[in-house]
Image: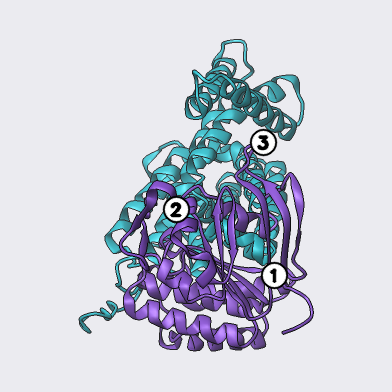
Chain colours: A cyan, B purple
Amino acid sequence: MLDVLLEPFADGIGQRALMEVVLVGVVCGPLGVWILLFRQTYAAESISHAMLPGLVIAALAGFPLLLGAAGGVLAAAGAIALAGRDERVGPDVAVAVAITTLFGLGAALALSPEAPPRIGELLFGDLLGVSEGDLVATGLLAAAVVAVLAGSHRALALAAFDPVGARSLGTRPGPIAFLLLVLLGLTTLAAVQSLGNLLVLALIVAPAAAALNLTSRLGPALALAAALTVAAGVSGLYLSWYLDLAGGASVALCAVALFGLSLLRRPARATGRPLRVFGRAPIDVFTGTR
Amino acid sequence: MTAAPVVAVRRLSGGYVAGDGALVDVNFEVWPGQVIAVLAPNGGGKTTLFRALLGELPFSSGEIELPHRPAYVPQTERSRLDFPVSALDVALMGAYGRTPWYRRLSSADREVGRAALDRVGLADRSRSPFGTLSGGQRQRVLIARALVQEAPVILLDEPLSGVDRVSATHIEEIFADLSAEGRALLIATHDIAQARRSDRVLCLARGQVAFGPPDVTLSTDVLRRTYGAELIVLDESTAVAVDHHAH
C-alpha cells in the first residue's frame, strides 16, 4: 500500500510536482474563498483569460512573464473601458467581447506553428515539467499573496460583508477589492506554469466553494479551502500517474469532484441547520434530533 | 448637553454625479443624545446624506463637521446571509477600526462584543451563524456592532424595515437607552409614527424641506412637499408614506 502511495513521487519530477501543488494549493484555497465572498468569480475567469496574450508575447520575446501578465491585464482594462464607452455595447458585453478577443488572440499566438515548443503550456500547464526555478518563483509569489491576505484579513472581511458600513469602520472597500484582483493576478501567474491559465480557475474556485459549503465560519473556511486545494492537487497527481492523464487536467477534475462531494453536506447558513464537517451528525436546533 | 453639536451640516449640496443635485442646501445640527428621524421618499437623498456623513461621497459645496467617525447600521434586508460569520464575529467588527492589522483583537474587545450582544438581547445567539438569525435579530447584531464601535453618532438606515414587532419594540428600547447615555442617532425611516417619537425630524426631497421638532415639522403640508404622490393622508393627524423600495 505504501509503495502505491509513494511510487508517483519516487523521482525528482514527481517530487517537484508535489511541492508545486502544495504551494499553489496553500494560496489558491484561501484566495478562492475571498474571490467567492466578493462575488468576483467572473472577474477571476476574465483576468486569467485576459492575461494570455501578454503571457504569450512575453514568452515569445523572452521578457519576464510577470511583465507580460501585467501588460495583458492593462490591455484588457483598456479594451473594456473603450468598448464600455459605446452606449450600444454596455458593460457586460464590453467585458465579454474584450476578454474573448484577447483570449482568442493569445490562443492563436500560442498554438501557431511558429510558436516555440511548450508555449501552449501557458493554456493547460505542465505540472510534471516544473523546474526548481519554477518552484522558487511559485514559493515566493505564494508567500507574498498569503502574507497580504493574512495582513488584510479584517479589511477584506469588512469590505465583502458590508461595503457601505466598511467605511465607518476604517476600511475603504474600493481599494480592497482592487487589491484582491491584484492578488488574483499574482496567483494566476504563480500557477500558470503548472496548471495553465485555463485550469487554474478550477483550483481557485472549486475547493473554496466546497469549503464554504462545509463550514459557516470564515477562519475554518480559509483553512479548509487550503487543505482541500492541496488534497485536490495531490489526488490529481495520483490520478495522473495511475491513469496516465495530463497532470493539470487531473488536478482540476479532482478539485471539481471535491466540490461535488461537498454538495452532499451543505451547511445551514441561511436555513437554520448547524454545521459539522466531520464526526457525528449535528443536532438540529429546531427539532433537537440528529 | 455639551457645548458643541456632534454633527453640523451647513449648506451641503452634492450627489453621486457632478451636477446631479441629489442633495441641495441641507442644514442641520445634531446634539448629544438627540434622536433625529430622516424622512425622504426613495431617491430623496437619505442614502446620499448618510454616505456624505460617512465620508464616502464628495460633495460640491457646504461643509460637514463631524468630530468623530460615526457608526453605520445598514438595512438588515440588504445584509449578506451567505457570509460565514457568527453573530459575535459581526459584533466584533466594530473593534476592527481601532485594532492595528498586525494585532489580534484584545480580550477586552471580545468582552465588549459579548456585552453588546447581551445588551441587544442576543447573548445566547453569539455563536449562531449570522445568516440563520431572523431579520430583527440580524438588525440587533448590527446595532451591537455599532455599540462595540463606541461611536458618539450612529447612522441607522431604516432599522425597523423588515423587522418583526417583538424585535422592533426591543430595538426602540435600545434607541432610548443609547439616547439616554448621550449618543446621537440619525434614523432614516419611512415610518411617520416613529418620526413623531424622535427629538427632531429632517425632511428631504433632494433639497431640505424642513428640520425641527416633530410637532412642528410633521404637518400634512411638509409631508406632502416631502413625499408628493407617495403620501396618503388618512385623517388630520395620520398620514402614511408608501414605501416603493424594491429589495
**How far apart are the two marked residues, 3 and 2, measured between alpha carbons?**
26 Å
Q: Chain of mark 3?
A: B
Q: Quadrant of the C terminus of chain A?
A: bottom left
Residue B120 or residue B4, whichever sits in front: B4
Residue that numbered label 1 is attached to:
B97
- Secondary structure under badge 3? loop
Residue A286: x percent and y percent?
Answer: 24, 80
Q: Toward the viewer: A53 or B34?
A: B34
Q: Identity of the amino acid at label 3?
A: Gly
Measuring from the top left, give residue B63's x and y in whole percent: 77, 55
Tell me the kind of residue under disc 1: Gly
At label 2, which amino acid type do we have? Arg
The residue under label 3 is B19
Residue in the picture at 45% in, 80% down:
B172
Residue A25 visible in the snapshot = no
How would you rate the neighbour count of disc 1 (Cα within 10 Å): few for under 14, some for 14-19, many for 20 or more?
A: some
Label 1 is found on which chain of the structure?
Answer: B
Which SS class for mark 2? helix
- Using residue B136 as the reference point, say whether residue A93 is left or right of it: right
Image location of residue A133, percent across then percent down: 72, 42
- The first of marks 3 and 1 along the sequence is 3
The spot of residue B109 in percent (x, y) is 64, 84
Marks 2/1: CA–CA distance: 41 Å
